[in-house]
Amino acid sequence: MVSKTLGSTSSRLLTALAGDNRNIFSIADAQEILGSSYDATLQTLRRLTRAGWLVRLTAGRYAIVPLSSGNEATPQVNRYVIARELLGETPYAISHESAMDVHNMLTRPVTTVVVTTPRRLARREILGVPYRFIYAPPPALWGCEPVWVTPYEQVTVSDLERTILDGLSRPDLCAGVSQVATALWLRQDDFDWDKMARYVQRMARRAVAQRLGYLLELYELGTPSLVESLQEMISVSYARLDPLLPDDGPTLARWRLRLNLEPETLQAIVRT
């Protein structure tokens, strides 16, 4: 327990935070618990940070470091909640591969937290987790929803439909089109296809429409009206099905795609 390895002041602070399920807290929160001055509280937090009990997220915000197994006095810190705290009042959305993780659209673990935000931030690592921030202007932050990632904390995440379209727009942020195909297949019963059609029109990226239309027909998903609307958006030029792969393979005139990822491979991915 923390009381066996910490002084009484530090132990009281961490125990109170754990009791309130506050894995992330401010200096003001700590000051209220300890009933001490700002300077005295800050010194306590600095000592705990140097000792490895806390990590400083931003100015005035700290997270409790997860302890080794066998010590349950301190709750684990959710990486998506940390991302939220890093942004503060700035709009954001957990997106791309990370949104797939939140929505249970993956069959493998992810290592990096991807966040879309109008605030320009450099990559960083916290508690061994890499954080990557993708710039987007505020009007681009649509198609998002609050999602519970712990019993006590919500974060903003791109919804199912926006997550698929983001993946088809930036396959490099979700391990390629094959991963988007897996996500599409896993949650096929949960998509609002009318909403998907509206989103594609709003995003207005022809390559996204072409890739989505191809995958929907390959897996026999979606609705005829959605496929028709996607057909109306295709470009006269050809796009690669997966931009991460070389520009080779046959072309498909219906969707103006270079099939550099074989349909047999895509079928095998979702059926294993």
Image (cartoon, helix red, strand yellow):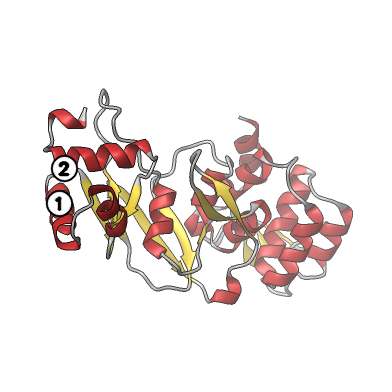
Report crowding for label 2: few under 14, some 14 to 19, many 20 or more residues within 10 A (C-alpha).
some
Q: Amino acid at mark 2?
A: Thr
Q: Assess whether mark 1 and mark 2 are in contact (beta carbons under 8 angstroms).
A: yes
Q: Name the residue furthest front.
A: 35
Q: Which mark is residue 44?
A: 1
The answer for how far apart the CA atoms under marks 2 and 1 are is 8 Å
Residue 71, visible in the rendered structure: yes
Along the line of sight, which residue is nearer the eye, 264 or 221?
221
Q: Residue at x 18, y 59 (%)?
A: 37
Q: Which residue is mark 2?
A: 9
Residue 21 figure quarter: top left
Q: Amino acid at mark 1?
A: Thr
Report crowding for label 1: few under 14, some 14 to 19, many 20 or more residues within 10 A (C-alpha).
some
Along the line of sight, which residue is nearer the eye, 94 or 55?
55
Q: Residue at x 24, y 30 (%)?
A: 68
Q: Residue at x 60, y 49 (%)?
A: 180
Q: Is residue 42 left or right of residue 203?
A: left
Q: Name the residue furthest top.
A: 70
Q: State the image coordinates of residue 155 (x, y, percent, origin top left).
A: 51, 53
Query: Where is the C terminus found, in terms of image quarters?
Result: top right
Q: In the rendered image of this protein, does residue 78 appear above or below residue 242?
A: above
Residue 190 figure quarter: top right
Q: Is residue 114 left or right of residue 189?
A: left
Q: Name the residue furthest right.
A: 224
The numbered mark, 2 or 1, whose residue comes first in the sequence reads 2
